[in-house]
Structures are given as structure tokens and as C-alpha cells.
Image: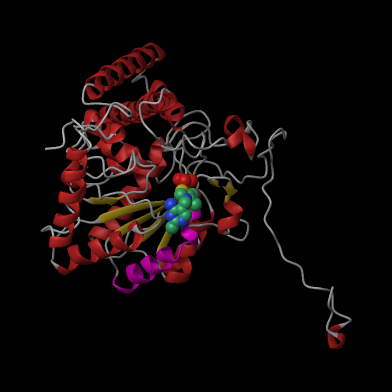
Amino acid sequence: MPVDAKRANLPPLSLHVPEPQFRPGDEVDFSDVAVPPAGEQPRPDTAADPGTFHELAYTLVRVLDEDGNAVGPWNPRLDADTLRTMLRNMALVRAFDERMFRAQRQGKTSFYMKCTGEEAVSVAATSALAADDMCFPSYRQQGILITRGYPLIEMMNQIYSNKGDKLQGKQLPIMYSARDHGFFSISGNLTTQFPQAVGWAMASAAKGDTRISATWCGEGSTAEGDFHSALTFATVYKAPVILNVVNNQWAISSFSGFAGAEATTFAARAIGYGIAGLRVDGNDPLAVYAATQWAAERARTNQGPTLIEHFTYRAEGHSTSDDPSAYRSAQEWSSWPLGDPIKRLKDHLIGLGEWDEDRQAAQDQELAEMVRKTQKDAEKNGILGHGMHQKFETMFEGVYEEMPWHLKEQMQQMLDEDDAAGHPGPKR
Ligand SMILES: Cc1ncc(C[n+]2csc(CCOP(=O)(O)OP(=O)(O)O)c2C)c(N)n1
């Protein structure tokens, strides 16, 4: 190793390469994950100065205690109907994920991504927003669409790229777009939605509107430059935006340490920007609701942005193309100290005397049946491998508002070649 003679007495430099605690086959011990007791975190005024958020950026805002009781100043005190609706929506997301994952394994679609274990992060957050607030999701917040009542068949049609697909088969499965449900078009390029959400919020403020925006990205995605741009614009203009970081511990096979989690929290990123930062138990639907409600009020009263880190765990593979048993211990999800968000809300409702196991089982069955029936209907519009489901020429539409001459020429060439090849099909 070359050593500079002038510094021969100094130790050689060494590089720190993060290494996850557990690998396949390892016994998992999460006892060093700091989980503060529920109810002990202070709830500041929504107009509080961003400089006062140090404690909240390093702890975990928690409402549901170990016995399923809602405690402390963050308890949003929701009525039983609202709690049951949230429980139902989270269970529906899980049922939908199960079914669509299986459809991919059966070769009916090319790709799918589940959000198992992270249902609260989208469902509870959306429940605390107004229906016309604008959401800028990543690919793992299908719970937003489900909470807003977007028809399941539309989601499935998109997943199947079939003739019912509103995106005309132009997008990879699950890259939904639903403007009328306040759901911005998902992009495959990580974190691009962050500055876009901030820009949307700035436009809303510039126009004197009352709507706010919310955006989500994974902890791995915070390493993108767009994350920095978004936070800078958000703080400079006090944009009415909620910046959600879903820390599910993994970015495909890279553990959160590769995005900087060994050094500090993701909520603490907010401090350097002068943004209010909250770190929340992402598997506690009441804490997620309360934090979002707090951040929404802050945004709506022109107090500026909030960054919320949702501390959770990605229970399943990254996508249908991923096998997590190749890089992490299979015990991680069952050992995760914050449990399962659906079970935690269910236990809370049972504790209140507003729910029971029989109703839960009946609901699970009803939701599975509804998803199954909708799937059958969607499959009537076509599945993967069963020919073309959209007219050939739609491929050239929407590139520009009006099709320029060179695209018209390419389209005609394609149609002529297809005719010459004697291909039948729904092309015109
Ligand atoms: C700009 C960019 N770089 C890389 C990728 C490939 N990629 C897709 S998902 C992913 C991991 C993202 O992890 P994280 O942000 O933690 O979100 P999670 O998948 O855990 O929800 C990567 C690297 C991409 N889609 N876009």
C-alpha cells in the first residue's frame, strides 16, 4: 500500500462500508432498535418553530401501546366508524396485493409490487388528508387509491395493460395515474415526484388556493439529488407540502445504512433545512394519522412543510422480480418490534369493544371475494400474452399534444408493415 513518507506515522485511511446486521440464516435480534413507550412524545403547536423539533426527529411518535390502547397527546381520538374504515382499507390493500402477486406468478401480468406491512403509511395518511389534496406517491402507496375509492377494476386493468387500461398499456404495471383522485402519475425514476410535489404546493399557494400536497418516497430514494432540491424549495418558499419518507429498512437488497441510516435518522434531515421533522411509528395507524393531520394543519395555515419519517419494515420482497431470502434473514419481519399495522388497529378496535375476531374473519373473506370477482371482470378485458389489447396506433399518441409529422410518418409505416405481414387484430 503506498504510504506518503511525510505522514508515515499516521494510520492508513480506511473506508467504512455499511453491512446489515443480519444475513440469510442469521438469528435476528432487534433489541437494539429503540422503541420509546407510546404516548410519551410531546405534540407541539402546529405553528411551532422548526428549530424546536430536534427531539421529535430522533424519537418515534407512538399512540398505540403494547395492549392496543390509544394514549398520549398524539391520540387523534377518531370515532369507531373512521377506525373501522381505516382497518377495512388496509385489509383491502393486503387482499389486493395477495391476489395481484398471484396473478403475476400465474403469468397474467409481467410485474407487481406489494406494500405488505406498510399499509398504514398510505391508508392512515390519506385518511387524514382532504379528498382534493394532491398526492405524489412512489410505487408502494396503492393504499392512497384504495382509500380514495378508486375502482379496483381500474387498478387491475392497468396491471394487465388490457383494453380497459386508461394508460393504454404504455406504463409498467402499478405505475398508476388518477388525476381525478388526486393521484399524480407514478414515474419509474425514483424521487422525481418530490420536487414535483413541492412545485405543485407552491403553485397552489401562488394561486391563493387552499389545497396542499403530500409526497412519499422510500428511505433509499432520499439519496437522490431530487430529495435535496425538494427540501430546499420547500423550506425557502414555505411550500404547503408533506414530505413522507417511508423507512422500510430496505432498498431492494441495500439496507437503510446505505442511505445514511447508521449516522442519523431520516427525520433529522429536516433539521438542516429548517423544516419541521417528525419520526413516526409507521406501523401505528393512529400515529401516522395524527402526524399527517398535524402536518396538514401546519401546511394549511402557511407554517410551511413537514418531513415525516415513517419507521416501518418491508415485509415482502421488493417486487415480483426479487427474492429477499438471498440477502436478509427470513426472521426479520416476524421479529420486527413494531408488529403488523393491520393487527395493531384490529386489536385496538377490539379493545374498544367496537370489533371482534369473527367480524375480522368475515371481512377478510368478503374482501378476498370482492377482489377475486373484480379480477375476473378485469380479466375479461384481457391479460398478458393474449394478444394486443390496445389499438396499435395509440402507441404514437400522447407523445405531444398534437402528433408531429415525423410521428405520423412512423405510425403509417408501422401500420403498412403490419398490413403487409397480414396481421389481423384490433389495430384500427
Ligand atoms: C433514479 C433511479 N435509480 C434507480 C432505480 C432502480 N430502483 C427501483 S426501486 C429501487 C429501490 C428504492 O428503494 P426505496 O427508496 O427504499 O423504496 P422501497 O422500494 O423500499 O419502497 C431502485 C434502486 C430507479 N427506479 N430510479
Where are the magenta residues, as a range?
A: 220-237
Q: Position of residue 350 (x, y in %)?
A: 40, 21
Q: Nearer the viewer, residue 305 or 41?
A: 305
Instruction: Identify the residue at image location x=58%, y=43%.
Output: 35
Q: Residue furthest right?
A: 9
Q: Nearer the viewer, residue 302 or 138?
A: 138
Side of 350 relative to 155 (left or right): right
Q: How many numbered tags mark residues here? A: 0
Quarter of the image holding residue 303? Answer: bottom left
The structure residue drawn at horizontal position 43% and vertical position 70%, both measured from the top left corner, is: 273
Is 207 rendered above or below residue 189?
below
Q: Which quadrant would the N terminus be assigned to in this image?
A: bottom right
Residue 223 lies within the magenta run: yes
Q: Residue at x 46, y 62 (%)?
A: 224
Q: Is residue 88 visible?
A: yes
Image quarter hosting the C terminus: top left
Q: Position of residue 21 (x, y in %)?
A: 69, 45
Most frequent secondary structure within the magenta stretch? helix
Q: Is residue 221 magenta?
A: yes
Give the image location of residue 426, x and y in percent.
16, 32
User: Image quarter for residue 127?
Assistant: top left
Q: Position of residue 107 (x, y in %)?
A: 40, 26
Would residue 41 be found to the left or right of residue 363 on screen? right
Q: Is residue 219 visible?
A: no
Q: Nearer the viewer, residue 391 or 320?
A: 391
Query: In screen coordinates, is 419 left or right of 320?
Result: left
Identify the residue at the far bottom of this view: 6
Report the coloring of the rendering. Answer: secondary structure
